[in-house]
Amino acid sequence: MISMVIGFLLLIVCGPIELWAFDKSAKDVVAIDSNYAFIEMSDKWDFTTQDDYNYIENAIDATEWDQIYSHVPWTYLPRYRSYRGNVIYRKKIEIKNKETINYALFVPLHYRGAQFYLNGKMFHESRPFNEEGISPPILGKPELIPINSNLLFSGINSLTIRTGSLNNVGGFLGTIRFGNYQLLQKKAVQFYLYYAALAAINIFLAMYFFYLYFNRRIEKYYLYFSILALSIGLFIIGYKGIVLWIVDLQFAYYFTTYFGAFFATLMMVLFLNSFLSVHSRIWNVFFISGIIFFSLCFIIEYLLTQKVEIFVTYLYNLFLMLSGIAIIYGSIRAYMAIRLDTQYAKPIFIGVFLFLVTHLISIFSFLDILPLPELTAEGFFIMANIFAYVLASRYSQVHTALEKAHDDLLVIDKMKDEFLATTSHELRTPLHAISGMAEIME
């Protein structure tokens, strides 16, 4: 079974590598051939740090601009690492046979508010910019932005985005899409429902297994898993920006995303050690101390500055290393449990291994090594659901064993009653004779 899973993942991941690995060229113009379609602008954009309003104009020559991917944080590129001002992205879109229909732009979560221009005219602000051209220190929500068809014309159009950075991170957390409004509206609804469903399922699992823990407090792994599932649910709605549609506060994003990731990492380790009966005090102390350290650093910086720039710049990569160590540690522990023929060790190993694979895919995507999909949320979800399946199977097994033991006790109790009844009858018969003879002798 494990070999089949590994083979399937390698087929999915490695199959397209020959086609993708060296496709780093940028398209000067992306074309939309049909008025009833949309395009994903996942290739490179024209990019400059010259925050000049004249650069927004359609006629400006961008041949001297840099070219980068919009979904890769520009602040991670060495030549822009120290820059903190606004930047400009630009993409030329060719519309063939334009009709009078509704167009739209679907924008993923972006690390700071942005202004959107078509052919030099602004049509949307995800966050309001002040007179100095500065947006408030809060992320831009993922949203569907309607476009007035009068701003577009057949031929080449210029889409320009002006945005900044927050906590030393700038760019978009995903691919920008342009096209037919109705089609993009369906995609937007699918996006929100998909990740909201993933989060809701995890939160439901958290409540359900906490209820089981409340009735079986001796088995701590039910508690660890309930916290793990809750952390994953919070992480998903934060990481994908859905929380900003619920509570439009930067702290809500910080709490759900970062603390969700912190506690998900820790609870995964504690759950594995508890469920697989691994007595490793040193590793538990190591991971608990690490998460406490990162949490305190995060809280202290936020309370003092209302930002987490130092944490993101200097400590976040260390946390990613710790989470990577936790995943590898969990994989090794689950594999060792398989070697020891521990019950349910195989599905546990599959869950951790699949999370490890999705984690690696996300790293390749994030670092722009390969144009692979970002699967962090899906990896967490798959692992949690496999763990839930294991816990449900174990609980069912224990419940079945208890029912069988209860039935056996009822049978034994019935046999006891029958034995006592028979013994009482057998003893009562001679006692009646002895009692009668005693009366005669008297």
Image: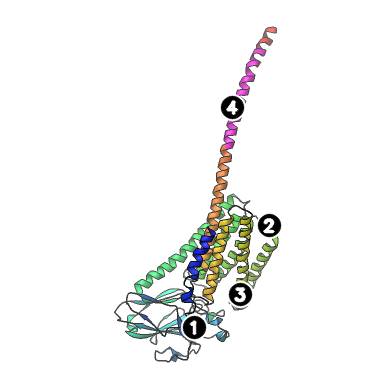
Q: Within the image, what quadrant is residue 363 found in?
A: bottom right
Q: Earlier in the sequence, mark 4 or mark 3?
A: 3
The answer to whether residue 224 of the structure is visible from this angle is yes
**Distance from Cα at disc 2 to Cα at disc 4:** 48 Å
Q: How many residues crowd around disc 4 within 10 Å: few (fewer than 14), some, or many (20 or more)?
A: few
Total marks drawn?
Answer: 4
Which circle, 2 or 4, is nearer the viewer? 2
Give the amino acid type for the residue marked by disc 3 in the picture. Asn
Give the amino acid type for the residue marked by disc 1 in the picture. Ile
Q: Which residues are magenta?
A: 408-435
**Distance from Cα at disc 4 to Cα at disc 3:** 71 Å
Residue that carries the numbered disc 3 in the rendered image: 317
- Magenta segment's dominant SS is helix
Residue that carries the numbered disc 4 in the rendered image: 418
Give the amino acid type for the residue marked by disc 2 in the picture. His
The reply to whether dot 3 and dot 1 touch (C-beta < 8 Å) is no
The answer to whether residue 174 of the structure is visible from this angle is no
Residue that carries the numbered disc 1 in the rendered image: 68
Task: Decide if residue 98 is on the left or right side of residue 230.
Answer: left
Q: Determine whether the residue tagged by mark 4 lies in a helix, strand or loop.
A: helix
Which circle, 4 or 1, is nearer the viewer? 1
Q: Earlier in the sequence, mark 3 or mark 1?
A: 1
Q: Earlier in the sequence, mark 2 or mark 3?
A: 2
Rendered location of residue 383, percent (x, y) = 54, 61
